[in-house]
Image (cartoon, grey):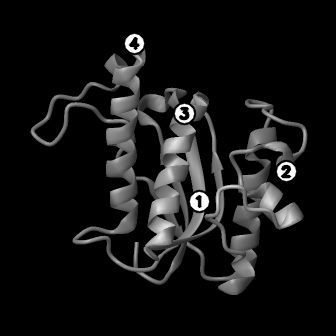
Amino acid sequence: MELREVYFWTDTINCWHELLSDDKLKLIIIRQLQWLTERDKIRVYAFVIMPNHLHFVWEMLEMNGKEMPHASFNKWTSSQFLKCLRSSNSTQTKLFVEQTPERSHRFWQRDPLAVLMDSKEKVEQKIDYIHTNPLQDKWSLVKEPENYRWSSANFYETGEDEFGILEHYHNYF
């Protein structure tokens, strides 16, 4: 990913485990997006957090120290997931064990998908996909996109940004 470019980004929980069914873990994701946004490291144009994956349309604005913001996002959320699971004595922790020199657990699959959004039409198609993801038969999480709290659909419907992380994609295109 390059700085100052907009990407459709998909990150998946390792082995497709439905770790993100827990709202406490979704809030960890939101908190990291807030932190990166407040420090002008990223702009988030759309998002959805599903039980085992997430999609963003976002832009990396500047490095977070020596790493790209998406790397900071994965690193911080992983450490917080582990802390949260350990504090609740969750049996899920063992699903993510990975003994390597770099880590003891892996929450995100390697190589998230990043697709450059080089036109307004592509962005609109991906935002529509993001917002209808919770309605898919496999999930059936809500009946209307704007009723899914863990998505930017309500922002685009009402202008309300519950988490304070969103910018309208018209501001870029």
**Label 1, residues with CA under 10 Å away: few <14, some 14-19, many ≥20:** many
Marks 3/1: CA–CA distance: 19 Å
**Label 2, residues with CA under 10 Å away: few <14, some 14-19, many ≥20:** some
Image coordinates of residue 133 in percent, x first then y, are 74, 45
Q: Are marks 3 and 1 in contact (CB under 8 Å)?
A: no
Is residue 155 visible to the viewer in this orientation of the structure? yes
Residue underneath mark 1: 56
Label 1 secondary element: strand
| Nearest to the observer: residue 153 or residue 30 | 30
Which one is closest to the eye, mark 4 or mark 3?
Answer: 3
Q: What kind of residue is marked 2? A: Glu
Residue underneath mark 4: 91
Image coordinates of residue 155 in percent, x first then y, are 79, 62
Q: Residue furthest left?
A: 101
Numbered tag placed on residue 24 in the rendering: 3
Label 4 secondary element: helix
